[in-house]
Image: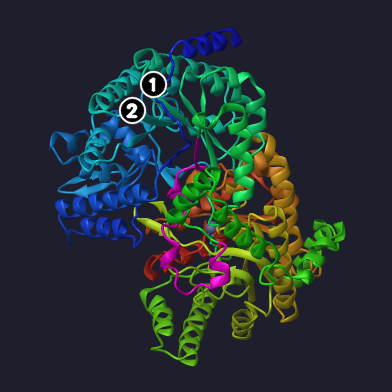
Amino acid sequence: FSKTLLYYIKERERHVSPFKQSVMIIHNLGYPRIGSQRELKKACESYWTGKITLDELQATARNIRLQNWALQQQKGIDWIPCNDFSFYDQVLDTALMVGAVPQRYRTLQEKKIRETDLLFAMARGYQRDGDDITAMEMTKWFDTNYHYIVPEFTAGQTFHFFSRKVTDQFLEAKKENYAAKPVILGPVSFLLLGKEKTAGFNRLSLIDKLLPVYLEVLSQLTKAGAEVVQLDEPCLSLDLDEAALQVFIDTYAQIHAAFPQLHILLASYFECYGKNLPVALALPVQTLHLDLVRCPLQLDDILETAIANTSLHLSLGVVDGRNIWKNDYTRSLQQIQKAVSVLGKDRIAIAPSCSLLHVPCDLDNETALSPEIKNWMAFAKQKLQELKDLRDIVNGNTALLDTNKAAIHNRATSPLIHRKEVKDRVAAFTAADARRNSTFPVRQNIQQQQFGLPLFPTTTIGSFPQTDDIRQLRARLKKGELTTEQYEAAIEKATIEVIRWQEEIGLDVLVHGEFERNDMVEYFGEQLQGFLFTKNGWVQSYGSRCVKPPVIFGDVSRPANMTVRWSSFAQAHTDKLMKGMLTGPVTILQWSFVRDDQPRSTTANQIAWAIRDEVVALEQAGIKVIQIDEPAIREGLPLRKENRAAYLEWAVQAFRISASGVKDETQIHTHMCYSEFNDIIEHIAAMDADVITIETSRSQMELLDAFAGFKYPNEIGPGVYDIHSPRQPSAEEMISLLEKAAVTLPARNLWVNPDCGLKTRKWPETKVALSNMVRAAEVMREKA
Ligand code: GLN
Ligand code: ZN
């Protein structure tokens, strides 16, 4: 293995890079494509509903590209990316580039629908003119909240250069006089990110068929005049086996052999190269990109190898592409200068750590932020300026450094951020703070006696349909068309109605419906200190869907009760148990832009203490069942196995801090969705919630196997129907799922509930589904 590596290192050295640099290059890995006013979102959605034509959509897209290029040019970016634009997702674009269109879309191709329509059909499904074709699967892009379309591969899979978007966009840029750098998802990661759809083959074996298409693409690009091409291989940040690494070696050797003069920039991000580093360093590419935000220490490792004697260039990802904080120039300059001292300026490029896709477009649009805090922040446009500043400072402009130092110092010491009482409290933690008074069996007896619930108690996950009427209430309150009193009266009415209805159908543990909440994180962030909200800080989540994450900028504290008003209002309107509803610390952390001036675990603990106080306040207000939602625990799992234990330890501890302030009598629930539990079941058990409700119906209860295999001791509510679809489940199908569950787990521990909250559903299907669910529980009780 290492012999082959040596061979390729030597092979690379025989070809001197044609790219003559005498200065430090600044470049960008990708720019947000939604537009600073979400123009692309609006145009796509208008196109889907037939309000604009494809030409109009294309014109909006072209404008965004031209604006992005002009902006990057203006900021002095040397290698301006192209092909980073996408109507939906860059992985889907790659599938189209290589003609990996699943069989089920062939009828559309035969009908000669336009390429953009085909792309949308693959992303969103196609129901029209008698065709009913499902969409491709979507999943999270590494540890981000961006979702990509999962390529589908079959055993007989062939590829051909199909979508010309990459060459078209290069030529479009060229016509505007930009010598752009095409950005393409590399062939190995493209295969690794996909899924085998037929049995009995390994998708990596398709590389021999796929590579010729990539070579064809590169050939077209070089003919068109491309000098630098960025191949993204983010899978190099994952744990890879030797076979996969060998595919990397062979693939890049072949690319190099075909295009010895082409400057290939290989980019991986979100993690260290880690064990893949020797291979990454040996690949015959001209420039290797390093994410120095996620992995600053790898720079030393790399500079200590023999790379000084090679011709490899390094792209230093010093500006954080995943967060919204101003770059600390002093720290970046240390990294740059360290690299320059070993390799020389002409072998260093600087860049964001990853594509800027993951940050909002332009801080200038935030006119309502406090000027002090705004001065600590940078969005995509500002990050381009940071790259330019860093180069200017390297070239002697020290005034820029002084301004930056002042901002960084201000942030480090600002009383807006630092609250001694919060830090003291977190520091005073002792193990007892994360432990309930008694063990679960003791608590379970007390709770079962006190509550007198039947076997298979029924409940829901929290939210009831957020109808247009409810959303309008909030919009009108914001606009000042409703007074707070009028708004609250309307929410009270909706809450009482949902309580009555739950009583009528016979649910055991009720919820208040969450009508007063806009979003499960925003609602809490708005009431906690240390959070701020932007007006326009949108980030693409998938397709046209964008999210606006809260920003956690300071020590988190809870100045007042957050949910007690609504939970006690609801409890006062029923004799049944009313479940209090909170979002857990890890989920709040995970779905926000977080501080980079302290470990994530510290921020999680601060939030945990705030939530704990709310839990205790609910208990004091007479709420006996309290749910702390943690749907995002799983998605926070680090990309590399070696980092997972440490994460799970602090994440579980944060949850336990939030849950452990109450008496044994108080029943703590937690809820998780979109999760697999196999590899983390012991940590789920360590959370020690009295009841956990999970999403299981789509897997036909298979997800329960992890709990059964582990002999999960606490109570558990496996979701008995899928809330993502308007389909109305019958009592019979829920009974059969419950029977499955009762085989694997003790009946005494089982709850009956849907997979998740019902906020995206409509009332008619909700009523049928929940009534059937209650009936299913009754049948189970009779059988028991
Ligand atoms: N309590 C929340 C709800 O019902 C939970 C949402 C979630 O798990 N994503 O809406
Ligand atoms: Zn859920």
Q: Is mark 2 within 8 Å of ligand 1?
A: no
What label sits on residue 227 in the rendered view? 2
Magenta stretch: give its range. 349-376
Instruction: Say which mark, if any, is on residue 18.
Output: 1
SS assignment at label 1 = loop
Q: Is residue 386 left or right of residue 116?
A: right
Q: Nearer the viewer, residue 484 or 218?
A: 218
Which quarter of the figure is the N terminus placed in?
top right
In the displayed structure, would residue 457 be above or below residue 188? below
Tell me the quarter of the image containing the C terminus: bottom right
541 or 570: nearer the viewer = 541
Please give the name of the residue rendered at 28% of the width and 32% of the height, measured from the top-left corner.
Answer: 97
> Toward the viewer: 581 or 18?
18
Residue type at the position of mark 1: Pro
Residue 513 in the image: x percent, y percent?
52, 73
Under tag 2, what secondary structure?
Answer: loop
Question: Would you say the residues marked 1 and 2 are in contact, meaning their CB atoms lie under 8 Å apart?
Answer: yes
Residue at 36% across, 74% down: 468
